[in-house]
Amino acid sequence: MRSITFEMPIKTVSEANCSEHWTKKATRHKRQQWFCKLFFERYVKNIYLPCVVSMTRIGPRILDDDNLRFSLKWVRDEISECLIPEKRSTYLDKNGKLRHIKGRADDDPRIIWQYYQEKNKNYGVRIDICSDS
């Protein structure tokens, strides 16, 4: 059994009840995904599927279960892209630039997702990935 744990200093909020300007949301999403990719490439080596991914949201207040899932949506999308890069889709935008479509790999049945949360004055996300191989 192979297990890897890392913690990212990012703030997650529930996207379901959020009424921020779209540029603020987009900036937060990009920051979350950038941290996920950075930490994943640095700490995660040779994780094979099937695996169990446990995500623990750390923050000053506890969210209910559906808002917890919404708050970790962008983290989940990026981790699944890192685990299964061959599911990444691309398209050409109207300016001819190649764009990536994320969020296609998180429905793979070989990844089991678990959600947890801890109360702390600082924000963060702890990722635990366990693989049998």
Image (cartoon, rainbow, N blue to C red):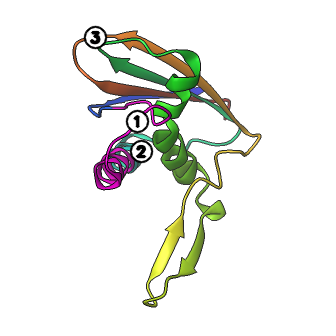
Residue 40, which numbered label?
2
Q: Is residue 113 left or right of residue 7?
A: right
| Dot placed on the residue nearer the N-terminal end, 1 or 2 | 1
Q: Is residue 100 above or below residue 128?
A: below
**Rendered-image quadrant of the N terminus:** top right
- Measured in 3D between alpha carbons, the distance from the residue under mark 3 to the one under mark 1, in whole angstroms, is 21 Å
| Dot placed on the residue nearer the N-terminal end, 3 or 1 | 1
Q: Which residue is mark 3?
A: 120
On whether residue 49 falls in the magenta region, the answer is no
Give amino acid for label 2: Phe
Expressed as whole percent of the image width and height from the top left, the position of residue 25 reads 35, 48
Residue farthest bottom in this picture: 96
Give amino acid for label 3: Asn
Residue under the image location 34 percent in, 12 percent down: 61
**Rendered-image quadrant of the C terminus:** top right
Q: Is residue 40 left or right of residue 76?
A: left
